[in-house]
């Protein structure tokens, strides 16, 4: 008998409660591989160092069908200060994906926050900057031609306040809209078969940012840019208002383009105390179910991929040097690699609606 959404969440909450204290309860059965339950890729971000851990590698390949490099395919890693390229870690991630029969999503070619020295030296130099911009994209996309099925070509183009496009080294030298259009064109030149995306965050949390993002998409399409899909990162908190994710996905899907739910995690918020999870964990589980249902409500042809931003809670960026939540538990598997109720509600949603 298949569970309804309500009973699935209730079952997951019961399992969560058992984990908090009722140790006499039998251990829950393993979840089926998430990748086996959906007709679209189920993705996860990785760092090259984690792939050296056999238990991590086996769990990753068992559950997921697509990889995104968390940061090692960004310009900050690939482009050295002397202008040379280092592809050792990106190559290792790509080789792992190939060996395990997994798809590869390239992340990311152009990001406002990355301003490497070789490009800084060309700041204001017109054609020289534009040529270097093209050559970098051709080199990176060309290296993974035929393997990377898709790319985040431009990442996070909208300001935090949601009011405008970001100004950056790239926009200053290539143009506010033009640096995005040219990046898409250069990526298409390098690999005509790869699906090309722009990607941003807080499109669920900030309707004004989503509106600005959508106006950008309209301009790009009007100018004939080779834009194939839209990425919404979906870094959200457990208390995001109900319906916000569905509203965002519905708006983005109005262009008819494929949608990549590209960096999902659901934080338990500031000052979370693991020993006293209380209502936050219950709401997080329900929020995972809501996100999955909203994605599954998209037309099948627009479900490009569903990617979570980390395998185990211990891997999350929210605990890392750039994160501010050292006790957070935002993912599908705990520190030991055991499936959590958050994974079970995804499994149910995918199996019922695939």
Image: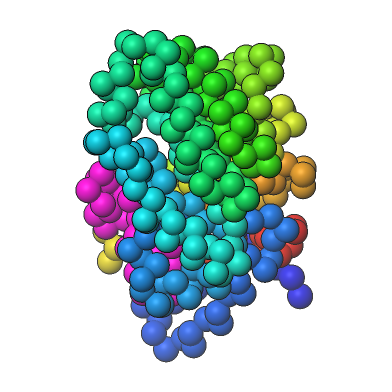
Whether residue 131 appears in magenta in the rendering, the answer is no
The quarter in which the C terminus is drawn is: bottom right
Q: As rendered, which of 202 and 62 lies closer to the eye?
A: 62
**Residue 166 vertical position relative to residue 347 in the rendered view, above or below:** above
Is the magenta region chiefly helix, strand or loop? loop
The quarter in which the N terminus is drawn is: bottom right
Q: Position of residue 95 (x, y in %)?
A: 49, 63
Would residue 188 appear left or right of 279 to someone viewing this image? Answer: right
Q: As rendered, which of 325 and 168 lies closer to the eye?
A: 168
Q: Position of residue 108 (x, y in %)?
A: 46, 39
**What colouring method underlies this structural image?**
rainbow
Q: Position of residue 246 (x, y in %)?
A: 63, 38
Seen at 39% across and 84% down, the residue is 23
Number of numbered discs overlaid on the protein picture: 0
Would residue 6 appear left or right of 272 to someone viewing this image? Answer: right
Q: Quadrant of residue 37?
A: bottom right
Instruction: Provide the residue span drawn in magenta.
Output: 311-340
């Amino acid at each position: 008998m298949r569970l309804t959404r309500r009973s699935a969440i209730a079952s997951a909450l019961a399992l969560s409660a058992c984990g908090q204290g009722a140790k006499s309860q039998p251990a829950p059965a393993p979840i089926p591989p998430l990748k086996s339950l959906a007709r679209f890729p189920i993705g996860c971000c990785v760092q090259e160092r984690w792939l050296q851990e056999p238990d991590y590698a086996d769990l990753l390949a068992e559950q997921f069908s697509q990889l995104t490099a968390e940061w090692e395919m960004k310009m900050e890693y690939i482009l050295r200060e002397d202008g040379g390229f280092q592809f050792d870690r990106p190559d290792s991630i790509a080789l792992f994906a190939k060996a395990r029969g997994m798809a590869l999503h390239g992340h990311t070619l152009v990001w406002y926050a990355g301003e490497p020295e070789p490009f800084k030296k060309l700041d204001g130099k017109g054609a020289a900057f534009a040529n270097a911009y093209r050559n970098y994209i051709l080199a990176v996309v060309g290296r993974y031609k035929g393997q990377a099925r898709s790319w985040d070509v431009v990442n996070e183009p909208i300001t935090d306040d949601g009011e405008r496009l970001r100004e950056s080294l790239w926009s200053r030298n290539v143009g506010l809209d033009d640096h995005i259009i040219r990046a898409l064109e250069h990526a298409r030149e390098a690999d005509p078969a790869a699906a090309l995306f722009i990607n941003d965050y807080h499109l669920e949390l900030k309707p004004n940012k989503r509106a600005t993002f959508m106006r950008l998409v309209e301009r790009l399409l009007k100018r004939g840019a080779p834009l194939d899909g839209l990425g919404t990162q979906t870094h959200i908190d457990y208390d995001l208002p109900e319906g916000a994710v569905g509203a965002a996905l519905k708006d983005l899907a109005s262009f008819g383009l494929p949608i990549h739910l590209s960096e999902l995690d659901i934080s338990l918020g500031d000052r979370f105390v693991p020993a006293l999870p209380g209502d936050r964990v219950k709401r997080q589980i329900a929020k995972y179910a809501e996100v999955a249902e909203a994605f599954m409500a998209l037309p099948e042809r627009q479900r490009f991929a569903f990617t979570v931003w980390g395998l185990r809670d211990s891997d999350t960026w929210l605990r890392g040097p750039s994160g501010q939540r050292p006790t957070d538990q935002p993912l599908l598997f705990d520190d030991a690699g055991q499936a959590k109720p958050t994974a079970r509600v995804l499994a149910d949603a995918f199996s019922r609606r695939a």
